Image (cartoon, grey):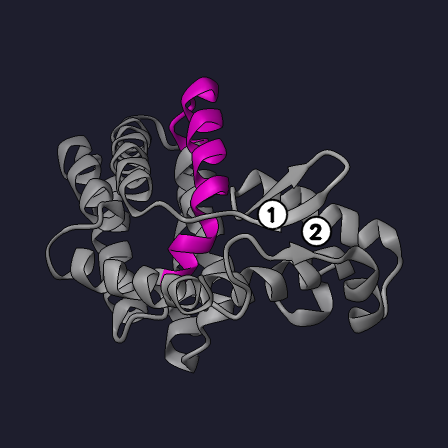
Amino acid sequence: MADTKRSNAQKLRDSLEDDIINGRRVPGERLDPEELGRAFNVSRTPVREAFQQLVASGLVTVSPKKGTFVAKVGIDQLIEMFEVMAELEGMCGRLAARRIGEQELAELRAAHERCEAAALAGDTDEYYYENEAFHDCIYAASHNTFLASEARQLKQRLKPYRRLQLQVRQRMHNSLNEHQTIVDAITQGDAALAQQALCDHVLIQGERFSDFVSSVRRMEAPISQTG
């Protein structure tokens, strides 16, 4: 998604999201809507919309009569959420391999090609957005609206941390290779392989777990320094 296609609220959300996951805004810090409005030259409405999106992803919390604050990040809860996300994605992949239509398959392949273009360009931001579209194609192709809704809801909460993963060296290119395995499995109608490939793609394990924990700890470092 090109920058010009994103709304003011989304640009502000992306900027705040990046600041939070990279530790430039620390847990417990108050977000001043007037200051942000001036800094981004936007009205109150985009600021309010950006806050709502960040609340949905769990990055900020709203305290009545006190304001909006950067939420604390709990590594244990994040790992548990990724475990559930992996299972939901795997179920979507299994059903998609059995139920996907020709048009849906074409859309999935097109999304994969856009991810490939972003990866070749070394554009992690573009890959992040196209990756979201890739996964959404799989949710839709499961033809299970309840499952797709649950997957989308949890994915929304994990968005910033999935984005954080892409900052790990070589993760974007490894992710693209995993996408190819997923597309091949769904194309071939191999439900078991599609499920396993998606679980492995999302689940944080092995070296990826260590890299992720390291990234989150770097994000949390300012807390101990200021506390």
Q: Quadrant of the rendered structure where residue 110 is?
A: bottom left
Q: Residue furthest front?
A: 227
Q: What stretch is highlighted in magenta?
A: 140-164
Q: Residue 54 carries which label?
A: 1
- Residue 55 in which image quadrant: top right
Residue 110 shows up from this direction = no
In the rendered image, residue 203, in percent from the top left (x then y), is placed at: 22, 45
Q: Which residue lies furthest to the bottom in this view?
A: 121
Q: Would you name the residue on which mark 2 appears?
A: 50
SS state under label 1: helix
Query: Which quarter of the rendering shows the C terminus?
Result: bottom left
User: Magenta segment: does it hold 155?
Assistant: yes
Give me the residue at 43% from left, 50% from top: 134
- The answer to whether 46 appears left or right of 21 in the picture is right
In the rendered image, the vertical position of residue 194 relative to residue 168, given as above or below: above
Residue at 69% from the left image edge and 62% from the top image edge = 12
Mark 2–mark 1 distance (CA, rounded to whole Å): 6 Å
- Closest to the observer, 78 or 135: 78
**Amino acid of disc 1:** Leu
Secondary structure under the numbered disc 2 in the rendered image: helix
Q: Along the line of sight, which residue is nearer the eye, 116 or 84?
A: 84
Above or below, 191 against 118 in this view is above
Q: How crowded is mark 1: few (under 14 residues within 10 Å), some or many (20 or more)?
A: many
Q: Do the residues labelled 2 and 1 touch (CB within 8 Å)?
A: yes
Q: What x and y, as percent, mark residue 32?
A: 75, 58
